[in-house]
Image (tube, coloured by chain):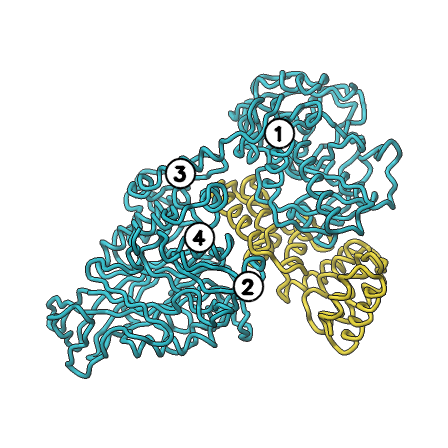
């Protein structure tokens, strides 16, 4: 049912799109977590005939969250970070990213690393940031690998400048890009 | 040209029987006790006494990605940290150490560098020639090779030709491939099937027969026959990654559907040992046939004696690794075993050679693995010196197996952190000089011209000469894509940002600097340094303001009343994060007298008079901004950029986009492509100089770029990095 919904949503006829939303909503009501998250994504960004609605988006992600799907927590973190549908709260964002990271979301792991690096919502901790970038890197997150590469080149995050490590991480980032990652 | 030498030519003491899953033919039956197990053709070989022992080494390369020579084709410089020509030296040394050996490649071999693209796309290789990569592998006398996922990047017709394997798939006539040149070694893959025939594209298993030198129970040398069976797996995700080539033509299965029957067949055909080649890593999540990394599950299929892994670009064994997949249950990352089976993963681009030294015992019927005499290690082609010793070797400068390591004595009297490299095997470079030179010539072929010198020497004080062309290329690509594919955004303005990647961190030569005149691919690589893919995000005017505010933290806070020199640049914010518009529709000021944000807080207060098309930018208006995967995904920690704003992630790299754009517009001029400066500093009179460093003797270039407020303060900044101190007059 979810796949039918996706197909309808890809069509240009607004009636079909509406039908697609109905289909997805039914799927979600019957417990399809992917459908729930897809609805959240749609309302978060808005698509041609479905206006952005951050409150509805957040509702969908909150409903999906108990299933422990990493994307739900990731999006809740992003929304808290950006103040979408909820007051901007870096602490809350970091909390969600932590949950999503534990569930293996490379993107959330990377954003959590950024939070520790910036001291946003969590105490500033370069060592922790570094470990989280490494973890995201091992999940082939290209921006994380590039961050590590640049950190080695410039001696950031408390690292000794190391050109060989810079080149190694850039190679890894380049390779990671060739494995099209699944977006959250 | 007649039928070429069949894969698996007889070379010395090896015969290779290409056993298929239907179990045809193969070696003579494994005889009963004392029976002469006929290997066919080796008549007169003595019977192997029960209790004989032997040592056989499995040597693995994986993910070479056409890095044959130690060379970077974009930068046109040697790169000793990579390259099969150096792994080859390790292979030669290992073969001397282990006279009984098999060299195996684990795929992702024929795609990855400009050389590969040159042979596949630019000047497509004719049928009667062998790919450079396979030439090198033929030279190295590989025994067998598996198929990875990148093998499919150039399509089935190309793969069929260069491997001289006539795939029988729907809608393609590839029977002529069998007459083409290619590898002299057998290639194996067990899990990619033709939709037309339901057979695998390649042989699903290969049985390699080797004459080995063993030691009899009485200590005397004994010649024996060893039969090693190979199966191979590639990630099922090829159907997504290379959908355009594979949809409707092939299907895949997983290890649990395929491995056991093949192993049984191999044993029936006389295999003493079975080795699993898997282009995948370790993942213990519940098995589904479409799991990307099936090595953990494969190791649990009974009857596998050793496993060669790849794809995830890690080094295994590696006791110090923090990679989560190496901490899974039953994985020993120090010893190199998975579920008790010796396993190795040899990194990528030739940086490591995987070595599984197998101790074997003859039990009267066949050779079996003695795990107590088995050692696994991943040997690097480069290492660093610590206390006069190479870090990759033990304290006696030996490999784990006890042989002298490749770096022995190289670190004598060397400072800590000196890098040492295995020398290249000269046979490889001389074999491929034609292809190598042709690739270099291709990279140097002019794709356009520039009437001005394009540099980042003064990019942070107003020279957009090396940035604007990148922005124009990115915007052009995105606008075009949106028009064709995303009509819902067709009404939104398309903008672009980019940053100067090289801003002198390492000194006066660490700047982008492209001379006026011809532009070639290597110049484009100087203009776009990083391996990024292009992405477009949808943001509001408020989002753009936040974006610029964060970028503006690249500048320190300047106190106009200060009489001592003040550095303009804030080193805590790297130059590669100074995103800039270079667009005649946009203008803004950066007020460097305003403070930087406290730790963890958003930046604000420095961007003034942000205008779009002559009016203040509407904070609620939506814009499309072209950028890259790093920035769009959260790199640099820009507010609101966290992966959630991307409306389009291109398959093309930013560099490829730039190259295509240069080819399109041909003649780049400062007037059209190098002077659309969008930002100015808010004018302020300072009591003392405001300074920054750049390359020495570069002032004329600032002047050529129209910057009239720059002057030289000090010829040499004293850092030893060939930098001068310049001053910028912020009142102008």
> Which mark lies nearer to you, 2 or 1?
1
Few, some or many C-alpha atoms within 10 Å of disc 1 (few <14, some 14-19, many ≥20)? some
> Label 2: which residue?
B237
> Label 1: which residue?
B666
SS under mark 3: helix
Residue depicted at 22% across the width and 76% down the height: B28
Where, by quadrant of the figure, is residue A5 drawn? bottom right
> Label 3: which residue?
B436
> Which mark lies nearer to you, 4 or 1?
1
SS under mark 4: loop
> Which mark lies nearer to you, 4 or 2?
2
Q: What chain is tagged by disc 1?
A: B
Image hue for chain B = cyan
Image hue for chain A = yellow
SS under mark 2: loop
Sequence-earlier tag: 3 or 4: 4
Q: Is residue B110 above or below residue B336?
A: above
Residue situated in front as seen by the camera: B100 or B263: B263
Few, some or many C-alpha atoms within 10 Å of disc 3 (few <14, some 14-19, many ≥20)? many
């Amino acid at each position: 049912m979810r796949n039918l919904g996706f197909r309808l949503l890809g069509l240009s006829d607004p009636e079909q799109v509406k039908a697609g939303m109905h289909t997805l909503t039914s799927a979600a009501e019957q417990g399809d977590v992917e459908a729930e998250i897809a609805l959240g994504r749609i309302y978060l960004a808005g698509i041609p005939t479905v206006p952005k609605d951050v409150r509805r988006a957040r509702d969908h992600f909150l409903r999906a969250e108990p299933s422990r799907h990493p994307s739900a927590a990731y999006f809740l973190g992003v929304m808290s970070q950006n103040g979408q549908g909820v007051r901007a709260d870096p602490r809350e964002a970091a909390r969600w990213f932590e949950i999503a990271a534990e569930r293996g979301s490379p993107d959330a792991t990377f954003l959590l690393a950024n939070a520790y690096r910036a001291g946003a919502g969590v105490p500033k901790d370069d060592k922790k940031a570094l470990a989280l970038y490494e973890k995201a890197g091992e999940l082939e997150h290209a921006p994380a690998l590039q961050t590590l590469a640049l950190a080695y080149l410039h001696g950031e995050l408390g690292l000794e400048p190391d050109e060989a490590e810079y080149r190694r991480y850039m190679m890894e980032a380049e390779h990671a890009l060739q494995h099209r990652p699944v977006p959250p | 040209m007649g039928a070429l030498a069949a894969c698996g030519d007889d070379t010395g003491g090896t015969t290779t029987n290409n056993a298929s899953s239907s179990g045809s033919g193969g070696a003579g039956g494994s005889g009963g006790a004392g029976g002469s197990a006929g290997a066919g053709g080796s008549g007169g070989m003595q019977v192997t006494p029960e209790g004989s022992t032997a040592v056989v080494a499995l040597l693995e390369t994986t993910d070479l990605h056409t890095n044959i020579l130690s060379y970077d084709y974009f930068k046109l410089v040697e790169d000793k940290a990579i390259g099969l020509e150096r792994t080859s030296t390790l292979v030669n040394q290992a073969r001397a150490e282990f006279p009984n050996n098999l060299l195996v490649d684990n795929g992702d071999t024929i795609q990855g560098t400009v050389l590969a693209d040159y042979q596949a796309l630019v000047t497509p290789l004719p049928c009667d020639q062998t790919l450079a990569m396979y030439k090198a592998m033929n030279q190295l006398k590989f025994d067998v090779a598996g198929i990875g996922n990148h093998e499919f990047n150039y399509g089935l017709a190309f793969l069929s030709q260069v491997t001289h394997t006539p795939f029988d798939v729907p809608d393609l006539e590839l029977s002529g491939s069998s007459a083409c040149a290619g590898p002299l070694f057998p290639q194996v893959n067990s899990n990619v099937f033709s939709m037309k025939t339901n057979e695998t594209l390649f042989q699903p298993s290969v049985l390699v027969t080797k004459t080995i030198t063993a030691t009899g129970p009485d200590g005397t040398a004994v010649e024996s026959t060893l039969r090693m069976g190979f199966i191979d797996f590639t990630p099922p995700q090829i159907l997504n990654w290379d959908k355009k080539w594979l949809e409707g033509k092939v299907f895949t299965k997983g290890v649990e559907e395929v491995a056991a029957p093949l192993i049984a067949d191999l044993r029936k055909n006389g295999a003493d040992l079975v080795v699993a080649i898997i282009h995948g890593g370790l993942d213990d999540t519940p098995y589904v046939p479409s799991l990307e990394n099936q090595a953990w599950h494969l190791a649990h299929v009974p009857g596998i004696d050793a496993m060669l892994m790849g794809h995830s670009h890690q080094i295994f064994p590696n006791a110090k690794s923090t990679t989560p997949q190496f901490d899974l249950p039953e994985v020993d990352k120090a010893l190199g075993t998975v579920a008790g089976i010796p396993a190795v993963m040899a990194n990528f681009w030739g940086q490591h050679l995987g070595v599984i030294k197998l101790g074997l015992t003859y039990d009267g019927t066949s050779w079996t693995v003695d795990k107590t005499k088995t050692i696994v290690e991943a040997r690097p082609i480069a290492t660093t010196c610590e206390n006069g010793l190479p870090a990759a070797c033990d304290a006696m400068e030996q490999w784990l197996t006890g042989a002298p390591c490749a770096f022995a004595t190289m670190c004598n009297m060397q400072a800590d952190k000196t890098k040492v490299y295995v020398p290249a095997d000269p046979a490889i470079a001389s074999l491929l000089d034609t292809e190598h030179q042709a690739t270099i010539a291709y990279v140097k072929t002019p794709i356009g011209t520039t009437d001005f010198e394009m540099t980042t020497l003064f990019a942070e004080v107003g020279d957009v000469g090396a940035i604007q062309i990148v922005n124009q290329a990115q915007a052009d690509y995105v606008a075009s894509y949106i028009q064709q594919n995303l009509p819902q955004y067709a009404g939104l303005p398309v903008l672009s940002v980019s940053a100067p990647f090289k801003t002198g961190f390492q000194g006066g030569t660490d700047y982008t600097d492209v001379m006026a005149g011809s532009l070639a691919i290597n110049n484009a690589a100087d203009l776009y340094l990083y391996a990024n893919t292009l992405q477009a995000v949808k943001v509001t005017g408020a989002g753009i303001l936040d974006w610029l505010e964060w970028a503006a933290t690249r500048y320190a806070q300047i106190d106009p009343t200060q009489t001592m020199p003040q550095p303009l640049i804030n080193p805590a914010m790297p130059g590669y994060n100074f995103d800039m518009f270079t667009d005649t529709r946009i203008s803004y000021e950066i007020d460097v007298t305003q403070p930087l944000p406290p730790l963890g807080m958003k930046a604000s207060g420095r961007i003034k008079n942000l205008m779009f098309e002559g009016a203040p930018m509407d904070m609620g208006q939506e814009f499309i901004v072209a950028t890259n995967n790093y920035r769009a995904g959260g790199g640099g920690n820009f507010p609101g950029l966290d992966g959630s704003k991307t409306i389009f992630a291109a398959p093309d790299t930013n560099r490829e986009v730039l190259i295509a754009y240069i080819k399109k517009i041909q003649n780049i001029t400062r007037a059209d492509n190098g002077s659309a400066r969008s930002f100015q500093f808010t004018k302020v009179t300072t009591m003392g100089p405001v300074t920054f460093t750049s390359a020495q003797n570069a002032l004329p270039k600032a002047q050529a770029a129209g910057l009239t407020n720059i002057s030289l303060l000090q010829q040499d900044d004293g850092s030893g990095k060939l930098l001068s101190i310049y001053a910028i007059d912020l009142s102008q």
